[in-house]
Amino acid sequence: MLQRQVDPDTLLLRMPSLRAVKAFVAAAKYQSFTRAAEALCVSQAAISRQIRELETYLSAQLFERVGRAVSLTPAGSVFFEASQLSFVNIAQAAERIRHTPQDKHVLTICCSPAFSAFWLSHHLKEFRANNPDIELNLITTQNFLTREPGVEPDVIISKFANVGEAYTIYPLCHDVIYPVCSPQYLARHPEVGTLEGLRSSALLDLSPFGRAGVAEHVDWSVWLAFYNVDIDERDAGSPPLFHANDYNLIINMVLADQGVALGWNQLVAGLVEQGRLARPVREQVTLRNSLHYLACRENTEHDACGRVRDWVLSKFSGWRV
């Protein structure tokens, strides 16, 4: 039987010796070949030899040698920054593997940073109290379709109905979007109680940059247009719009009385109920053509995934339409 010929891996072939890079990182960290040798339990001669081989391979001098001390050259600084980061990543991955019990199920949940900050953070206390045997691992991302190698969440909460064949999909809710501000801001600016007054207030706007995974984008111009209000007709003395793609930042600015933002109901409803946020107008926009979904990997022997699924669905039971 003929074996398939494997083409040479040019990336691996171009890599310098990891043993030499390890010696280099130690020498750069301690600024001494002697201390690097002690840290790695090898001889100083071995460190010097590895460094010479690495410099020959790179065709660049990595250290300035002054007596017994050494300091990085500009080329050495560039190589040290990349090498140290790579070794840290390797060491952390190894520790995760070594210290994860193979017989213990750790359930991984994946969601957006905003959902984590404004929904999960307010509800997880209840779930953890009622399910002390489940160990949770939370990963936040804005890109649900391209995950890091080795990251296979058990539960994904996102706006995507298809995140992989291994998942069963459950609809959670539509987007319901309405203006929010702090009660103090509303008291100082009663004019935001009308759409026209709202248009000319200090508006904090969620920008689309870095949010390519979101199916649609609703900002102030889009939201006001639903009610035939043109944002370009703001009063001449209106404060400038503030734009940010970080929803956590925007809501924290609202809580600090700095303006009015659009609130996504599933994220801000709890803050409204607590009285920390106010709705200056009753108008709201419901996006009927899109949904948030719970994706659950259910082909596991452990029932933790099912318990998380049932808990999340129970929280959204009154929101599904």
Image: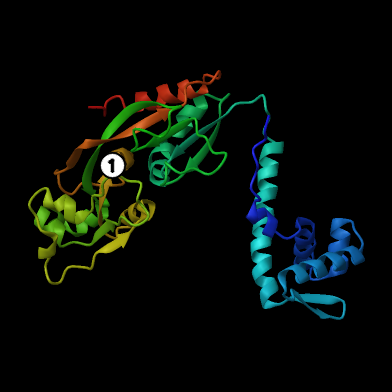
Q: What is the number of callouts on the image?
A: 1
Viewer-side residue, 102 vs 279? 102
On the image, the x and y values in percent for residue 104 come to 64, 26
Quadrant where the N terminus sits is top right
User: Whole-percent x and y of residue 70?
Assistant: 80, 75
The residue under the point 73% across, 60% down is 16
Kindly indicate the quadrant of the structure image that contains residue 239.
Answer: bottom left
Left or right of 200: which side holds 122? right
Q: Is residue 168 left or right of residue 208?
A: right
Residue linked to disc 1: 272
Check disc 1 and give the amino acid type.
Val
Residue most toward the left? 228
Query: How far from the left and from the top, in percent, is residue 217?
Result: 26, 49
Dot 1 falls on a residue whose secondary structure is helix
Q: Residues within 10 Å of mark 1 (few under 14, many from 20)?
A: some
Q: Position of residue 121 (x, y in %)?
A: 44, 39
